[in-house]
Amino acid sequence: MNAFYFQTASFMLLIKKMKLKGLRNLFLTAALVLLISPALFAQKGSLELLGNVKQNGKGLEGAEIKIMKGNEQVDNILSGNNGKFIINLDLDAVYTLLFTKSGCVTKSIIFDTRVPEPIKNQLLSNRKFGIELFKIPEGVEQPKELDKPVAKWSWNDSYDDFDYDLEYSNARKQENEQIKKVLEEQAVAQEKQRNDSLAHARLDSINKAKAAEQVRLAELAQKKKEEEQQKKLEAERQAAFAAAKKREEDSLRAEQLKADALERARLAALEKARKDSIEKAKALAEQLAREKAAEEKRLAALEKARLDSIAKADAAEKARLAALEKERQDSLARVKAEEDRLAREAAKEQARLAALEKARQDSIAKAKAAEERRLAALEKARQDSLAQAEAAAKAAEAARLAALEKARKDSLEKAEAVARENERLRLAALEKARQDSIAKAEAAAKVAEAARLAAQEKARKDSIARAEAEAKEQERLRLIALEKARQDSIANAKALAEQKAKEEALEKARLAALEKARQDSIAKAEALAKEQERLRQLALEKARQDSIANAKALAEKKAKEEALEKARLAALEKARQDSISKAEAAARAKAEADAKARAAAEARAKFVADSTARAEAAAAKKRQQEEAEARRLRELEEQKQALAKANEKSESKQTTASLPVFEDTNYAEGLTEETINESNRKIFRTIIKKSNTTDVFSKVVYNWGGIYYFKNTTSMSEANYNNELKKYKDQLGK
């Protein structure tokens, strides 16, 4: 019965292609039909569909095609390159083909493969058709009108082939065109809305950026305005400082001119007194000559006492100068420590403060150099003054030896009056200088209080330098006055000694009184000098404390300004960081969206690649089947020739064997698998035996590549074979 079972479909195609003509061919055809008729009715036919899925007229790759047989899904494939696909449908059934793809509408086609009885076992092919899946806007549900099948295919006896319902398809086509137009309009509106939203967001971002830029420009303008105001204040402070300095210099020049005038008047009076004394001394020369021997002895004692007094005065002066030098060094050390602290703070400032610091250092260096030059000049002047005093003392001594007693008395009275007047003038000048120094120190402190840190520091240094210069000048004047008083006192003592030579007892008492008065005068002068020094130190200390307080206040103000600036910069930095964070968040969101899109694209590409691979595998399999079919056709041709010869000899030969005979009694109940090897094929057989039924599944693999599937003696597709066999195995728990 199954002798020519596997060649049935090939014979049917061969018959169509032969276009039989003539009685001979007709006879041959009849003979072939009679020979293969047992197998013809044993095979189940199928329909091969070739088609493609399109979108906007182009092939749509990766579209999913579900094959439904009734309510059961029997297969699922994807469209390949250019949207092409191949589907094999069993005959004598009703199928629904569902075409879907993400972002597109879903369409369906009904295929009714029921055919007339004579061709139910044929293999039909070359039924080509296309279907278009247009896009659907995001978030829009598919209209219910699209749930209807777009076409219905069935067998048409008039054409002796499958055909579709033209009237029904045209009606669906019009509906689809209207729906497509509506969806396209919605898609355009949706795209416009999305673009408007993006444009609005971009505009908002631009506006925000512009607002931030305006704020930044306003802050820069405010900062520039503050800097200009600061520069203006600095210029005003510099002008005020210059004006104060000019006033101070003018005051000093006026005081110097006044002091010079007083000094010239004093010197003129002294010169007149000196000349008068010389004239009177000449009258006393004879008397002094008589007393020369005694006077020389007394003068030697006085000279020794004078030298001792000078040595003590020099030692005291050196000690005082050493103390002053130590105080000056300590003050310089304190100033240096303060300068170091300010330098450390100034190191944190900008180039402007560095330039001011350099100018300050240069000024200090110049001041130190000027101070050293001034001290050297003072030392030289002191030495010159001592030398001149010594010379004047010698000259006065010679004149004194030549003076007379009357001139001595007159000179003594006049000298005492001049000394008293000089002492009064000196004390008044010292007091005025002290008051002026205190007033200048206070004025300098007030000026320093209104200046900035750098200007204050400079004013303080200048004030200290001026105070030290004034104190040194006062000290110089005091030393000169003391030296002159000492010289005058020595002269007076010598004059008194001359008088004592004449009246020894009275002279001793008077000289003792004069010496006591001199010592008292020196003590008072030294006490006054010490008091002045103490007041000067107090004034300097107050100026220093005021300067430190002002510097501290300015430092605190500067710290507050720096804190405000840091807070403002921190706010700006926070705003910048927030902007960067937002931009980074947006960038991360975009990156994540891009990554998801890439992942989806990769998944789609993989899906398409896998589908393409499956389609290519199916195509390769189809090619193999076509090649097998071609081989079968060749074999049929050979068989035809053999049959022709057989007709001549009135006998036929079979070229293939049927399935091996199956005997139920040889198998136990349950599932049994076995392999049967034959010369031209291999049979994989699975026997499923139950209490009352036995089913045999056979997979026949020929050496030339052909593969066939059977359930018992009925041919079936590979998919149906695998599905049914799987169901049985699942039932048996295999």
Image (spheres, rainbow, N blue to C red):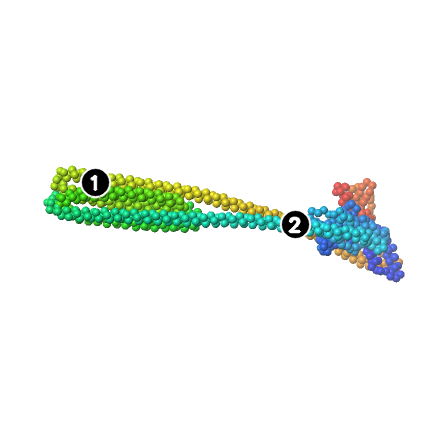
> Which residue is at 82% across, 58% downward?
14
| Mark 1–mark 2 distance (CA, rounded to whole Å) | 112 Å
Q: Position of residue 518 (x, y in %)?
A: 21, 40
Q: Residues within 10 Å of mark 2 (few under 14, many from 20)?
A: few
Q: Position of residue 467 (x, y in %)?
A: 32, 45
- Tell me the kind of residue under disc 2: Arg
Query: Tag on residue 518?
Result: 1
> Which residue is at 13% across, 39% downward?
504
- Tell me the kind of residue under disc 1: Arg
Q: Secondary structure at mark 1?
A: helix
* Residue 279, placed above or below residue 517: below
Query: Tag on residue 599?
Result: none
Q: Residue furthest bottom?
A: 22
Q: Would you say residue 646 is visible in this rendering? A: no
Q: Residues within 10 Å of mark 1 (few under 14, many from 20)?
A: some
Tally the marks: 2
Residue indicated by mark 2: 194
> Which residue is at 83% across, 58% downward?
16
Q: Would you say residue 564 is visible in this rendering? A: yes
